[in-house]
Image (cartoon, rainbow, N blue to C red):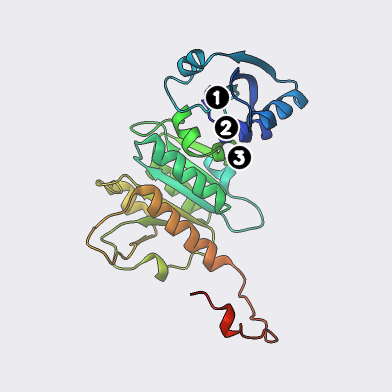
Amino acid sequence: MVIYGVNPVLEALRGGHVTALTVSRRRQGRLDELLRLAERQRVDVRRAEPDELNRLASGGVHQGVVATIRPPEPRAVRDLIEDGAPALIVVLDGIEDPHNLGAIARTAEAAGASGLVVPTRRAAPLTAAAVKASAGALAHLPVAPVVNVARAIAELRSAGVWTVGLDAEAPRTIYEVDLRAPVALVVGAEGRGLRRLVREGCDWLAALPLAGRLDSLNASVAAGIALFEAVRQRRPPSHPNRNAQPRSTSSRVR
């Protein structure tokens, strides 16, 4: 698999996935860090002109670096259910834009998610564009490819994971759902939303309350809001410092 871009390649190097590296003859800067890491891992490095890099990246924004990597090992759905901390899983249903896929993966990894469930048919594949949009998160986030999303949801439920589908027409909001237990957030495609069997398979449906004139959000934005609501709910309650003194008037932001 070929990937490109400084952050995706750097994270792939950190994960030990890179087998070969092609870098621009004319670029330095952050490439120095990549080259040092590649040297320590004894990765084959080759210099190339921009035209060749453009060809290798199929016209993508490569930032002067293209890498060949070993594809991440696919996981089974049950592999995403960790011992210890309650699982936080994202299930995608019909996300067709690789940039949305990558953006969701990036947010999921940042939120400490256990993994991502992605359909293998009628959905965005794990391409170089998706890896680039994930800023390298797909080098670290476990991914379970599945043929049937509804069946994957049933498998999660049987393993004790609550499934919450994001649905604009749901009677409750995401803020009214307890996300502290093991949970899988199910995100549908923009416009179409969750498919019927997937929607019916969820334990709960939850909406994101909107205050403006638009009636929908980008799928990756919706996933991010739900993920970090789960993070917020799971955070231990903070205790304010009772000895803290109020800021002086002169230090207030104007």
Q: Nearer the viewer, mark 2 or mark 1?
A: 1
Reading the image, the residue beneath label 3 is 140
Residue 21 falls left or right of residue 61: right
| Residues at marks 3 and 2 touching, judged by CB atoms closer than 8 Å | no
**From this viewpoint, is residue 73 visible?**
no
Reading the chain from its start, which is encountered first: label 2 or label 1? 2
Reading the chain from its start, which is encountered first: label 3 or label 1? 1
Image x and y of residue 142, in percent: 57, 40
Mark number, residue 6: 2
Image x and y of residue 99, in percent: 40, 37
User: Above or below — where is 57 with respect to 147?
Assistant: above
| Residues at marks 2 and 1 touching, judged by CB atoms closer than 8 Å | yes
User: Above or below — where is 162 with respect to 126?
Assistant: below
Reading the image, the residue beneath label 1 is 64
Of the pair 250 and 100, the residue shown nearer to us: 250
Of the pair 17 and 242, the residue shown nearer to us: 242
Query: At label 3, which amino acid type do we have?
Result: His
Image x and y of residue 103, in percent: 45, 43
Of the pair 223 and 123, the residue shown nearer to us: 223
